[in-house]
Every structure is written in structure tokens, then in C-alpha cells.
């Protein structure tokens, strides 16, 4: 069994998908293990709630399992399952917003007066204000120390593109923090 | 890959703020909480795999077997839309809209109602609208689509139903009615033609056809308050050649698809076609602009909507009826192409002098 798992780690996503489609649950399990941390990070970048993000990742894998025969390019499993995850997380976010009042976001002077000296709060706010696709990159990078290569694979992009997006995200965060009075 | 301006001082702060310990994924536990999926994995996808493929195939057949779709001037738009929506998984870049998502979402739709407008214009005449037997060819459209029952397109001119096309999926039969003339046309699917086209453009190959041409992202916009992202598709040679030029001469087309960022569903589909003199344009050079908006999805549509029995008082369209609508020069074109015998046209011209057939 251990050997099976060991050899599976060397298999490409494409092979694992093909094996999963032929009644090999362990192959799907390996795909889950591979992408689960990325899915949690992506979901958390949308939901901003770690526990909900874990639920979203679990549901994503269930949806991916059901939809697996529709995946025409098995080598694209990563970007595909991440796309499903975004949808599920957004649905959960909408559901949560329907059930609860939206989270109060401090604005302008109010934040300045209440939290100017609270770097963590300013950082949290800066991250929260990032556009979704940039927040996603930041979460993927810092959630679980994913490498550029890993992120690039998950998002079907080049490492250069990932680097560019990450720099743009950090620049926005830095600008926001400076406008809120943060000094290094 | 490090740059001077990459704000590295933020890294430790972001690590502290964002970093989480993620528990290793426990597949056994997941399988316990998702028994249906676990069963699927254990038993294999042999049935469901087949079903999934068949479903896509059926949608494709449903579009391609419809003579109306194949032979209508809107074929290219529908094809372009189909390539995107029902083609293989495909994720160009990582924008707000991932087309693989859209395919998946659309694949989950069983019924939909689409509203839109179809305008035929003469090219180079300051956009003069094509006039067909006294009716300006500006049609408000309502389309009903059902995976189970088929497809209906209603075209309204000045608020009155001008045509209704019904393709019944189970009976593989098409009915077209023209209420102003109390005429109908009905025909079965032409298997031979459908087979040729299917072989030429299977769903698997379709996306390659699309990518053969240029597409570009149009960026974000808002349609009726919905945030959307647009994609534009340019003419693809293979699509232009999908039908013989004598039947439908698509000289150029552009398609735009606007997809809702939140729902990942198509919100609006636009198409602009330049059609040369061909049978489908009644041997006129025409520009067609069609805009479709997704109105409702997964709603109940009465099975009777797809009924293909012609109304009692209607009579079937004959070749004589069609010839009355075609300009003389077009008839010569038909004869030249060998579609009609020259003698037949001459005979019809003599008869027409005796009086024209009024609308019933």
C-alpha cells in the first residue's frame, strides 16, 4: 500500500484522472491530497474564513468527483478543480451574506481614528480590499508557502505571470498601508 | 525572479497574517462523509462517463441535426457559442471568467429561455433594413430550449408572430410556421448532411476550430447591472466553409459572448454576419446582426411548446410559394446553379403576369 502511494506521487495528474475514471479511488485520493491545500487557500481568499474554506474545499472535491468524466483535458485537473472551488466559495459567500448582515468594513476617518496603530488590522483591511484574483495569489503564496511553480501549475499560468501578479498585489497593499499611516 | 520593487518587507507580515496550518487531507474520512461520490469512485464511471459524453453529444446533435440551425443565417453564431459552451474543458488564462466553468455551468442547464433580436440589413445602403415581401426584417426573438424536448424560436415583426421554428428532439422533426401567410413547412432531419457536418466538426474538434481564429478578451463591462467579461471571436475559415456557398455564403462574422462574472453563465451573445448571395439569403447580400440574452434557466417549459403538428387552417409551403418571394435575378442564379430548371422559371414568370398571390 505504501509503495502504491509512493509510486502515485510520481504520476502525472493526467494518469491519476484516467485511473480514477477506471474505478481506482486511490488515484482520486492522491489528486485530493495534491490540491486540497490550494483549494483551501483559494476558498479562504474568497470567504475569509478558514473553517468555511475547508468545507468549501471538501465540497469542491465532491463536485469534482461527480464531474470528473466531463473533464476533457485530464492534465488540466488543477486549474479545473480550482475553478470549481471558486464557484462553490462564491456560492457559500452569497449564502452567508443572505443569512447574516454583511461584515462591517471600516472606512475613511473611522478606521484612521480607531485602528491607525493597529498594523495587523490595516494589513487585514488591505488584503481584504485587493481584487479577488490578486487576493487569491497572495493567499496561495502565503497560506501554505506554495512555490511559484506550484501556484503556476494550479492556475495554469507562467511563473513570470505569478510573480507579476504577486508584485502588483503587494504594491497595492503597501500603498494602502501607507495611506493609512503605516510606516516601516 | 526578485525585483527591487517587490515590497519584500511585506512578506513576513503577510506570512504571519495569512499562514494557516492545513490538516493533511484525509481521504478515508472524506469518503465516509461523501458516500455517493465514494461509491462512484469504487464502481467506476462506466455508466456515468457514457452518459456525460452522450449528453454533450446529444446537445451537439440537437443543434447540428436541426435543419433550421444548420441552414439558418444564425448558424455561425450558434456554432461559435456552442464551441465555447459545450466544447472540451478549456481555460484561457486566469481572468475573472474561466470558460471551463462556463461550460460546466451550461452543461447543468436543462431548460432555458433566450430573448433577443435579429436584424437583416442591406450592406452599403446606410444600414437599410432588408424588406421581405413588405415586412421589415427586424425580428424580436424568443427561444425556448429544452434538453429533453427540443428547441423553439419565435420571430416577431412589429409585435406579431412572423415565424415559429420548432425542432422536436424525440421525433427528429422540424416544423416552421409563417402565421402571416398561414403556411407551414415540415421536414425530418437530413441524416446524411448531419453526418458529414458532425464528422467535420465534432465537439472534440470544435474548440480547435475556434482557436484556429483569433479571439480576444474584451474586458469587463456591466450589462443590466450584471458585471460581465467579454470574449470576441473572429471568423474562422473552417466555419465559413461549413456549408456549401450556394446554400449559405458566410463571408465574414464576428461573435461576442458576455459572461457573468458571478454566475459564470452567458449573459449576452452577439453576432454579426456578412452573408453573400446564397439560397438562405434568397440570393441577396445581407448583413445579419443577432443579439441574444439569457432570460431564464431551468424553468418548467410545457412539453406542448415543442409540438410539431401544424395548425389546422395552415397549408404547406410549396416551391411556387418560395419562387414568388425570390427576385428575378435570384431565380436566374438558382437556374444557373442547377437548382431549378430554366424552363420552370420562365413558366412561373408568365403565370405571375396574370396576378400576384396575396397574403392569406
Image (cartoon, rainbow, N blue to C red):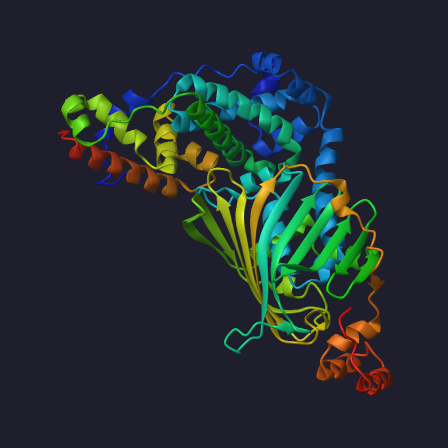
Compare residues A34 and B14 and report the one nearer the observer: B14
Query: Does B204 appear above or below B125?
Result: above
Asked if residue B355 shows in the view, the reply is yes
Query: Does B3 appear above or below B279?
Result: above
User: Residue shown at 34%/21% (left/top)?
Assistant: B19
Query: Does B182 appear above or below B261?
Result: below
Q: Position of residue B297 (x, y in %)?
A: 61, 39
Quarter of the picture holding the N terminus of chain B:
top left
Query: Does A112 appear above or below B74?
Result: above
Compare residues B102 and B291 and report the one nearer the observer: B291
Q: Position of residue A30 (x, y in %)?
A: 57, 22
Q: Position of residue A143 (x, y in %)?
A: 37, 24
| Left or right of B16, for residue B346 | right
Q: Quadrant of residue A127?
A: top left
Q: Quadrant of residue A177?
A: top left
Q: Position of residue A144 (x, y in %)?
A: 38, 23
User: Residue shown at 79%/60% (left/top)?
Assistant: B193
| Left or right of B314, for residue A133 | left
User: Residue shown at 78%/68% (left/top)?
Assistant: B360
Amino acid at each position: 500500500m505504501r509503495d502504491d502511494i509512493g509510486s502515485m506521487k510520481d504520476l502525472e495528474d493526467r494518469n491519476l484522472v484516467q485511473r480514477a475514471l477506471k474505478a481506482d479511488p486511490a488515484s482520486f485520493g492522491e489528486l485530493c491530497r495534491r490540491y486540497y491545500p490550494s483549494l483551501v487557500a483559494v476558498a479562504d481568499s474568497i470567504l475569509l474564513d478558514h473553517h468555511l474554506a475547508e468545507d468549501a474545499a471538501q465540497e469542491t472535491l465532491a463536485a469534482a468527483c461527480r464531474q470528473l468524466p466531463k473533464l476533457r483535458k485530464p492534465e488540466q485537473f488543477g486549474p479545473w478543480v480550482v475553478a470549481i472551488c471558486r464557484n462553490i466559495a462564491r456560492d457559500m459567500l452569497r449564502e452567508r451574506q443572505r443569512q447574516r448582515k454583511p461584515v462591517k468594513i471600516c472606512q475613511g476617518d473611522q478606521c484612521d481614528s480607531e485602528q491607525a496603530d493597529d498594523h495587523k488590522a490595516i494589513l487585514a483591511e488591505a488584503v481584504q480590499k485587493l481584487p479577488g484574483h490578486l487576493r487569491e495569489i497572495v493567499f496561495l503564496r502565503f497560506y501554505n508557502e506554495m512555490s511559484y511553480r506550484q501556484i503556476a501549475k494550479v492556475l495554469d499560468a507562467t511563473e513570470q505571470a505569478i510573480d507579476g501578479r504577486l508584485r502588483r498585489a503587494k504594491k497595492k497593499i503597501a500603498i494602502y498601508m501607507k495611506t493609512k499611516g503605516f510606516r516601516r | 525572479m526578485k525585483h527591487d520593487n517587490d515590497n519584500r518587507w511585506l512578506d513576513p507580515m503577510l506570512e504571519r497574517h495569512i499562514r494557516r496550518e492545513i490538516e493533511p487531507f484525509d481521504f478515508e474520512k472524506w469518503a465516509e462523509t461523501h458516500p455517493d461520490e465514494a461509491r462512484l469512485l469504487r464502481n467506476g464511471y462506466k455508466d456515468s462517463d457514457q452518459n456525460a459524453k452522450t449528453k454533450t453529444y446529444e446537445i451537439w446533435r440537437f443543434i447540428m441535426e436541426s435543419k433550421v440551425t444548420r441552414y439558418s443565417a444564425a448558424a455561425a453564431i450558434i456554432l461559435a457559442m456552442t464551441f465555447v459552451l459545450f466544447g472540451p474543458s478549456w481555460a484561457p488564462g486566469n481572468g475573472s471568467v474561466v470558460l471551463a466553468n462556463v461550460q460546466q455551468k451550461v452543461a447543468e442547464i436543462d431548460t432555458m429561455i433566450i430573448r433577443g433580436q435579429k436584424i437583416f440589413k442591406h450592406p452599403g445602403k446606410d444600414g437599410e433594413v432588408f424588406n421581405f415581401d413588405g415586412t421589415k426584417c427586424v425580428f424580436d426573438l424568443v427561444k425556448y430550449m429544452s434538453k429533453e424536448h427540443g428547441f423553439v424560436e419565435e420571430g416577431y415583426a412589429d409585435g406579431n408572430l412572423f415565424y415559429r421554428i420548432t425542432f422536436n428532439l424525440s421525433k427528429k422533426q422540424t416544423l416552421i410556421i409563417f402565421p402571416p401567410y398561414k403556411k407551414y413547412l415540415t421536414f425530418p432531419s437530413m441524416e446524411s448532411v448531419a453526418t458529414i457536418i458532425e464528422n467535420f466538426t465534432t465537439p472534440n474538434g470544435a474548440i480547435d476550430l475556434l482557436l484556429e481564429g483569433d479571439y480576444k478578451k474584451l474586458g469587463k463591462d456591466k450589462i443590466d447591472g450584471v458585471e460581465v467579461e467579454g470574449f470576441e471571436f473572429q471568423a474562422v475559415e473552417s466555419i465559413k466553409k461549413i456549408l456549401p456557398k450556394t446554400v449559405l455564403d458566410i463571408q465574414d462574422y464576428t461573435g461576442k459572448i458576455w459572461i457573468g462574472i458571478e454566475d459564470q453563465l452567458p449573459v449576452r451573445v452577439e453576432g454579426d454576419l456578412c452573408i453573400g448571395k446564397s439560397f438562405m439569403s434568397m440570393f441577396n447580400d445581407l448583413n445579419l446582426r443577432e443579439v441574444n440574452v439569457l432570460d431564464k434557466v431551468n424553468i418548467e417549459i410545457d412539453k406542448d411548446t415543442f409540438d410539431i403538428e401544424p395548425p389546422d387552417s395552415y397549408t404547406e409551403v410549396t416551391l411556387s410559394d418560395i419562387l414568388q418571394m425570390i427576385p428575378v435575378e435570384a431565380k436566374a442564379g438558382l437556374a444557373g446553379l442547377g437548382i431549378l430548371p430554366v424552363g420552370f422559371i420562365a413558366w412561373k414568370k408568365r403565370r405571375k403576369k396574370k396576378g400576384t398571390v396575396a397574403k392569406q
